[in-house]
Amino acid sequence: MVSAGSSPKFGKDRLPTDAKKILESLASSWGIKIEDVNSFQVIPLKGAMTNEVYQIKWPKDKEGESRKVLLRIYGEGVDVFFNRADEIRTFECMSHHGQGPRLLGRFSNGRLEEFIHARTLSASDLCNPSISALIAAKMKEFHDLPISGPKKVFLWERLRKWLEPAKNMASIEQVKEFRLDSMGEEISFLEKTLSNVDKQLCIGFCHNDLQYGNIMIDEETNSLTLIDYEYASYNPVAYDIANHFCEMAADYHTDTPHILDYTKYPNVDERQRFLRAYLNSADNQTKNLELDDLIRDVEMYTLASHLLWGLWGIISEHVNDIDFDYIEYARQRFREYWRRKVILLGS
């Protein structure tokens, strides 16, 4: 689901007892011999920044096939970002709608999921017009899912919820550098501004973290699967698209995964092409959205994306031990916010 790493953090000997029992039960149900039940490998997968993710792989059987599942170890302290029970419900709902991997079992600090036999997208894939069109259509399908819960904007509540721990965790210098003392007013200003701009607000169930590592492609069927729903909620669809565009600046599989290159942000033609593909996948109701209006709204919502993931970076520096320069990542997101704000709002 993500690229294989080189130095495991979580070996077989450290697996929780309840996780081992689930693996034994799965292996037995697949007809794996008793002596081979515990002969699996634990292979670390790279690219996740909230959880630790591993492939569990059994040796090939006499038919030459190998069974695989995905092991997800929840990151410590990341419950500040989302409600784990809500995320599990979303995961199960997605599985019910045929939108993602099946849940195979849960244990105290993680879960086991179906291993999807598909390729995770790379950063360069997002620039491929044919793949980009598939993503646009898949996003529209995702946004239309009938997920239970209040169909209201969750974005602003999340921003305010993350601001408080970010301020408490940041150093005095970081509070000053990132203007955290006045960030509450900035969030309110942005909410009011976008509410005035977005007159025909279109709410859908949004992924909210659609980076390339959360998109998988089956190259035989040319079909996509969106994975990892920790941050999913109802929101303006323009925000979800904006967040996806912002992720085009990232490549999390380099020696400096925290560095963002905003020259990779899609140009006008690329944004129009993506949004046409999105609207062409729409039902009659959303086809009433004007392309120019959606382009404008998406650009405005990039500002909210930069603020949100800037705050995420500050908090992650203190709650996550994954090897990633979260503060520098936050610095770049806030810097881009202030730069884009001048361009989009003139102040």
Image (cartoon, rainbow, N blue to C red):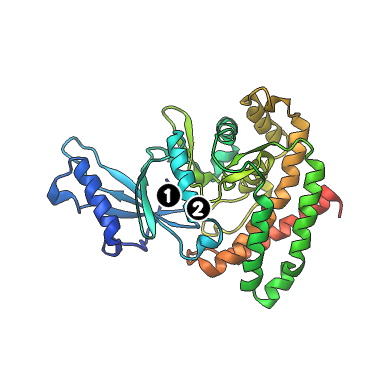
Q: Residue at x 69, y 57 (%)?
A: 307
Q: Quadrant of residue 203?
A: top right
Residue 151 placement (x, y as % from top left): 63, 41
* Relative horizontal placement of residue 193, taking residue 105 as reference (left or right): right
Q: Residue furthest bottom?
A: 172
Q: Which amino acid does label 2 sit on?
A: His
Q: How far apart are marks 1 and 2 (CA)?
A: 8 Å
CB under 8 Å between discs 1 and 2: yes
Residue 105 placement (x, y as % from top left): 33, 49
Residue 48 in view (yes/no):
no
Q: Which residue lies furthest to the top in this view?
A: 284
What crowding class fits label 2: few (fewer than 14 Cα within 10 Å), some (14-19), or many (20 or more)? some
Q: In this view, does 185 lie above or below 22?
A: below
Tally the marks. 2
* Relative horizontal placement of residue 12, taking residue 331 as reference (left or right): left
The C terminus appears in which quarter of the rendering? bottom right
Q: Which residue is drawn at 73% across and 51% down?
A: 303
Residue 57 in view (yes/no):
yes
- Mark 1 lies on residue: 3
